[in-house]
Amino acid sequence: MNFQPLGKRVLVEREEEVKTTASGIIIPDNASKEKPSKGKVVAASKEAEGVNEGDVVVFAKYAGSEIALDDKKYLVLNLEDVLGIIK
């Protein structure tokens, strides 16, 4: 994959969360209507100060634009939609 975000943007791969009910039934993320708002930064523009490749970030629920690269889905986020970095 060769993608370089421009402006104050980052490329994020969403983290898929597997949820388990109290009775032990596993509910895959794609069964939920809610999309995860956490993911790993795969690429960051030079202008996206403070966010680096490999960071796990939390972002606004409906933020970004989905793109597909190498048969994988990613999200291009404006830096202002990144709410924080999980350390």
Image: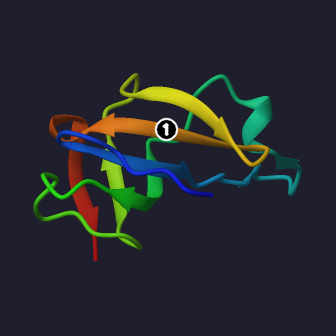
User: Considering the image in quadrants, where does the C terminus appear?
Assistant: bottom left
Q: Dot 1 lies on which element?
A: strand
Residue name at image x 80 percent, y 31 percent: 31
Left or right side of 83 for 35: right
In the image, farthest residue toward the bottom: 87
Residue name at image x 55 percent, y 56 percent: 2
Left or right side of 11 for 48: left
What's under tag 1, amino acid-wise?
A: Leu
Residue name at image x 17 percent, y 42 percent: 8
Compared to residue 20, the image places residue 65 above or below, namely above
User: Considering the image in quadrants, where does the N terminus appear?
Assistant: bottom right
Compared to residue 61, the image places residue 17 above or below, namely below
Q: Position of residue 20 (x, y in %)?
A: 76, 54
Q: Position of residue 52 (x, y in %)?
A: 28, 69
Query: Where is residue 67, by image quadrant?
Result: top right
Q: Nearer the viewer, residue 52 or 23?
A: 52
Compared to residue 42, the image places residue 63 above or below, namely above
Residue name at image x 39 percent, y 51 percent: 4
Query: Where is residue 5, by image quadrant?
Result: top left
How many tags in the picture? 1
Q: Which residue is mark 1?
A: 75
Q: Nearer the viewer, residue 65 or 62?
A: 65
Q: Position of residue 28 (x, y in %)?
A: 80, 45
Mark 1 nearby-residue class (10 Å; few <14, some 14–19, many ≥20): some
Specify how the rendered protein is coloured: rainbow
